[in-house]
Image: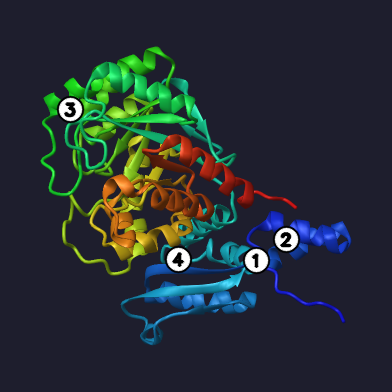
Amino acid sequence: MAGHHVILLHNEEEVKRCLERLGPDKGGYPYLIPKALFHCVLLKDIQAPAANIIKQEMLATGADAAVSRQTILGQGTTDVLLMGTRKHYRRFIEKIKRQPFGLKKVASDLETMLKAVNGYSSHSQLALAHGQSLPLGERTLVMGILNVTPDSFSDGGSYFDTQRAVERGLEMIEQGADIIDVGGASSRPQAEIASEEVELQRVMPVVEGLVRRGVLVSVDTFRARVARETLQAGAHLINDIGRLQMDHNLLPVLVEFQAGVVLMHNRLQMNHGQPYTDLISDIIDELNQSVEQALEAGLPRESIMVDPGIGFGKTAAENRYIVKHLAELRSLGLPVLLAASRKNFIGLTLGLEVDQRLEGSLAVAVAGALNGADMVRVHDVLATVRAVRMADGIRMENG
C-alpha cells in the first residue's frame, strides 16, 4: 500500500529540494516555487479607501483579503489580513505600486517583508564601527554578557574589578562568543540606574582592555556621552535599551561613528504600564519608529539590529509568546537579537532562582535560533554556543 504524509515547506530552498527529488522539468521551477509558499500578512491601520483597493486587487490575483465589515462605507481605518502565495503577492505588489492612498509604501514594505520571512536578509553583514562587521545568516551569533556592576540581577559584582572583567571577556571569546557586551549601569526592574560618570568609570577601562586585545565590543548604554567615549576608545556597537528615545543625543553619535546599534523595545523605562493592543504588532510598530528615525538621520540599514526587549515591561506569558513568534520580527527586514538569558520569566516558568536557570536559558536560546534570532545575548557562553550550533545544524539541514 502506498504511503502518504504531509510535508511542510518553509522557504524557497526547501521547495526547490522537494522539486529536485520529484524530478519535474527544471524550466518549470520559476513558476512552481512561488505557488508553493502561502503567507498570511497582517497590515495595521489601513485607511478604508486603501483597504478596499487592497481587497479588490488581492481578489483579482486569485488570492483574498479580510477587512472590517465597515470598510465598505469608505471611512475610518481597518486592519487587513492578506492571504496568498508568493505568486499572488508578486502580482499584487506590481498592481498597487501605481495606486494612490499610500499604497506604494505598502508595496515596498511587503517586498521587504516577504524577502525577510523567506530567509533573505536585507544584508549579509551587520556593519559595526571602525570598519568591522559580523556575518549574518551563516549561524546564530553569540553575544557574551559582561556586567561591570555591583547590582546586575545575575552576575552583579562578579566582574567589578577591571582585570577580572577583561579576563572574563577574553574567556568568553575563547568559548565562542562573537562579541562582548559590556554594561556599567544595571537596567533590571526596581534598579536605580547608575549615573553617567559612574557608568563611564566602570566601562571605559574594560572596553579599552578588550579592544587592545582585538575583541569586538558592544556597550550596553542608552547615553550619548557614554557611547561617544567608548566608541572613541574602539567599541564597535551600542546596545541601546532606549531605542534612541532615552537620550536624543545618542543618534547623532551613532551616525558620526557609523556604529552598529541594537534598538530594543522597552516598556519598563518608557511607557511603563501602557497596555498592549496587540503584543507583537505593538513591538514591531514601536521598533519601526526608531528604525525610520535612524535611517532618516543617516545611519545605514546595515548597521541596525532589533531586540524585542524580553522582560522589559512584559509578563512571563508575553515573554514566552514573543519567543514563539520571534520570526514575525523579521518582517522589519533587519537582524534580530534575543536577550533572554537567566531572566525572570524563565524562573517563573520553571519555579527556579536566578542561579538555577541554565537549562531554561539554553532552551530559550535554541527556540530563538530556530525561530529567527540572528544573535543571542547570554551569560553562559560555552553551553549556549554548543546548544545553538546544534540548533543551527537542524535548521540548516539540507538532506
For marks 2 and 1 on the same chain, the one whose residue lies earlier in the sequence: 2
- Report whether 303 appears left or right of 188: right
For marks 4 and 3 on the same chain, the one whose residue lies earlier in the sequence: 4
Read off the residue under disc 1. 37
Asked if labels 4 and 1 touch by Cβ distance under 8 angstroms, the answer is no
Viewer-proximal residue among 170 and 218 = 170
Would residue 261 be visible to someone looking at this image?
A: yes
Q: Amino acid at mark 4?
A: Pro
Instruction: Give the answer, above or below, for where 3 lies relative to 131.
Output: below
Q: What kind of element bears circle 4?
A: loop
Instruction: Give the answer, above or below, for where 62 lies relative to 205.
Output: below
Front of the two marks 4 and 3: 3
Read off the residue under disc 3. 199
Quadrant hosting residue 281? bottom left
Would residue 235 be visible to someone looking at this image?
A: no
Instruction: Give the answer, above or below, for where 80 lies relative to 199.
Output: below
Alpha carbons under labels 4 and 3: distance apart: 50 Å
Q: Amino acid at mark 2?
A: Val
Alpha carbons under labels 3 and 2: distance apart: 51 Å
Q: Which mark is residue 100?
A: 4
Q: Residues within 10 Å of mark 3 (few under 14, many from 20)?
A: many
Q: Position of residue 233 (x, y in %)?
A: 31, 16
Count of marks placed on residues: 4
Asked if labels 1 and 2 touch by Cβ distance under 8 angstroms, the answer is yes
Read off the residue under disc 2. 15
Viewer-proximal residue among 26 and 71 = 26
Front of the two marks 3 and 2: 3
Q: What kind of element bears circle 1?
A: loop
Viewer-proximal residue among 360 and 56 = 360
Front of the two marks 2 and 4: 2
Q: Residues within 10 Å of mark 2 (few under 14, many from 20)?
A: some
